[in-house]
Image (cartoon, rainbow, N blue to C red):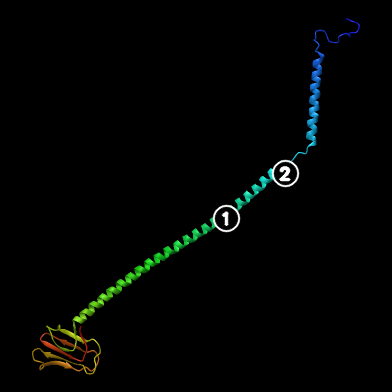
Amino acid sequence: MSENQSPSTVPAGVEEKPKTEKKRWGLVLSSVLVIGALVGGVFWGMDLVDPKESEEYLALSESHAAVAAERDSLQSDFDELEAGIAGREEAVEERGVALDEQAANLDTRDQELKDAEDKVAAREKAVGKIEAEQLENSVEDGVWTVGSDIKAGTYRAKEAVGSDCYWAVIKTGTNGSDIIDNGIPGGGRPSVTVKKGQDFESSRCGTWVKQ
C-alpha cells in the first residue's frame, strides 16, 4: 500500500460496488423527485372542474328535462284521451242498453198492434158476414113471393119507418085480391112474419131484414 492511499473500509468478504453505479442511482432518484415535485405543483396549481358544471353536462341536463317535459305532456294527453274514450264507451254502452229496451218495447207494441189488427179484421169479417147475410135476407119495396124471391120467416124494418109506410101479406096467385094481413105502422120498426104460399108487399117502408 502506498502512502497516498487510505485504508479500505469495505468489510472483508464484501465486494465493493463501483462508484459510477452509485452516481447513476443518485441521478435517477433526483430525477424522480424533481418530476414528482413538478407534477405535484401542476396539480396543486390547477383548479379541478366539477363535471356537473360542464357545458356538455348542462346541455344533456337541458335535453333530458325537455324530453321529460314532452313525455309528461304526452302522458297527460294520453290519460285525457283514454278517459274520454272510456267515457264515450260507457255512453255508447248505455245508449245500446236504452236502444235494446226501446227495441223490446217496440216489439211488444208491434205485437199489441198486430193483435189489435187481428181483432179488427176478425170483427170486420164478422160484421161483413152479418151484412152479407142481411143483404141476402133483406127486402126492399115491391112484391115478393115467399119461397122463390125471399125466405120464409120474420122480417123487421131496418130503420124507423115514416107515416106513409104500408105493408101487406097476400095469398100467392090471387093478384093481390086475397090480403091475409096488412098495416100502416106510422113509425117505429115494424115486423112481419111470412111463409111459403104467400107474397109480401112493401111500399115506402125502406129495407126489411130477416131476423
Q: On screen, 116 above or below 45? A: below
Give how far apart the Cα atoms at labels 2 and 1 are.
34 Å
Q: On screen, 171 above or below 31? A: below
Label 2 belongs to which residue? 53
* Image quadrant where residue 5 sits: top right
Residue at (25, 76) in percent of width and height: 126
Q: Is residue 64 left or right of residue 40?
A: left
* Image quadrant where residue 197 sits: bottom left
Percent from the top left, x then y, of residue 135? 20, 81
- In what element is the residue under mark 2? helix
Q: How many marks?
A: 2
- In what element is the residue under mark 1? helix
Residue extending furthest top?
A: 1
Instruction: Please tell me how crowded label 2 is: few (under 14), some (14-19), or many (20+) other residues with Cα within 10 Å.
Output: few
Q: On screen, 79 above or below 106? A: above
User: Reading the chain from its start, which is encountered first: label 2 or label 1?
Assistant: 2
Q: Amino acid at mark 1?
A: Asp
Residue extending furthest right?
A: 3
Q: Is residue 110 left or right of residue 134?
A: right
* Image quadrant where residue 24 sits: top right
Residue at (47, 60) in percent of width and height: 92
Label 1 belongs to which residue? 77
